[in-house]
Image (spheres, rainbow, N blue to C red):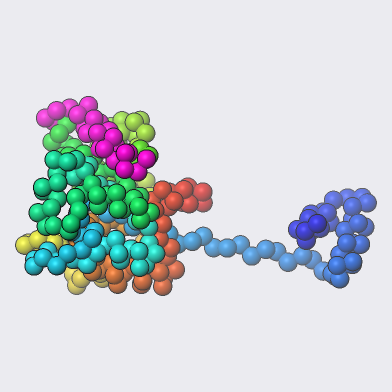
Amino acid sequence: MSKSSIVGLRLLPGVLVPLCLVLLVCRGGDATSAPKPLASASPQKLIALTFDDGPRPWVLKGNSQPGYASASLLDLLDRQGVKATFFVMAWRLAPSADKECRKIDAGITCRQAAEEEHRRGHEIENHTYGHGDFRRMNKRYGEAWILNDIDRASRTIEPITGVKPRYLRPPDWDIWPELAQDIEAHGYHVMTKSTSVPPALRDVDSEDYFCYGKNQSKCPQPSLHDYVLRTIEQRERKGIDDQILVFHELPGSVEVLSKLIPELKQRGYTFVTLQKYMQAVASR
C-alpha cells in the first residue's frame, strides 16, 4: 500500500483509523504528524514555433548561393531539439512546382523538403493551396472556391503526413467571422491574431517578412531579434507565458532563431508542435 493510500485511510471513520495508525507505526512514521502536501508543479511555459509560406528547400536544407545564402533551418532545429510546425502553401508540393522550387537549388524539390520535415518529426499544416487573398478570391470566385482551395491543400499534404491537417492559417490573417465559421465547420481550427480569442491562442507575428528583400524599411528596430524578445516580454508582463510564434522560411529568420531559441530556453520555455501546444493549453 502506498503512503498516499494511508493518508486516504486516515480520513475515513471507524476501524480504519486504528489500522492507519498501525501501518504508520510499522513503517516508522509519526502518527501525530500531518502528511506533507504534495508540491504542485507550475505549468510549463510553452512555445509553438511555426513557419509560413514554405517549403523552401534552399532555407530548410541551406545553401551558399550569393544573395540567397542560408544556414539549414532543419539542422538548426535538430541541434536545438526543437519540433516545429510548418504551414505550407500546397501548390509547392505539386510536380508542376519543381522547376520553381529549384531556382535556388538545394538538391531537392519542395515536396521532398516537406517529406524531410515530416521525417524529422515536424508538423505540417495548411496555409491554403494557392495562397490567394481571401477577400479578392471571394469577390472573384465566391466562398466555395476558398473552401475548395483549403481542402485541396489538405488533400495534397495528407499523403505526406498520413493525416489531414487540423490547423489553417489564412494568408496574411485576412479573414472575416462568417468565413472563419464555415472553415471551422469543415474541421479546421483557424489561426488568428484577433483579440476575440484568448491571448495564449493568438499568433505572435515576428514580422520577419519585413526584413527580407530590397525594401526593409519596415523591418523592426533595432533588430528583429530584439523585437521578438520585446514582444514576448510584453506578453509575459500581462501573465501570458505561452506563445505561438510565427516566422517564415527566410535566411535572416534562421540566423535570428539560432540566438533566440537558446535564449528562450533559458527563460524557461519548452518548444512543442502546435498540436501538443493546443492540447496543453486546453487542459489548463
Q: Quadrant of residue 160?
A: top left
Residue 148 colored magenta? Answer: yes
In this view, the residue in front, 117 or 253, is: 117
In this view, the residue in front, 83 or 118, is: 118
Residue 32, horizontal then vertical, whole percent:
86, 68
Q: Quadrant of residue 37?
A: bottom right
Most common secondary structure along the magenta stretch: helix
Q: Is residue 192 visible?
A: no
Residue 206, horizontal then vertical, whole percent:
25, 60
Residue 253, horizontal then vertical, whole percent:
22, 64
Residue occupying the point 35% across, 30% down: 185
Residue occupying the point 35% across, 52% down: 119
Q: Quadrant of residue 27?
A: bottom right
Question: Which quadrant of the rendered structure holds the N terminus?
Answer: bottom right
Residue 77, horizontal then vertical, whole percent:
33, 63
Residue 208 colored magenta? Answer: no
Left or right: where does residue 232 sit relative to residue 27?
Answer: left
In this view, the residue in front, 229 or 49, is: 49
**Residue at the outermost front position:** 107
Residue occupying the point 37% across, 39% down: 163
Residue occupying the point 73% across, 66% down: 36
Q: How many marks?
A: 0
Q: Is residue 186 visible?
A: yes
Q: Which residues are magenta?
A: 139-162
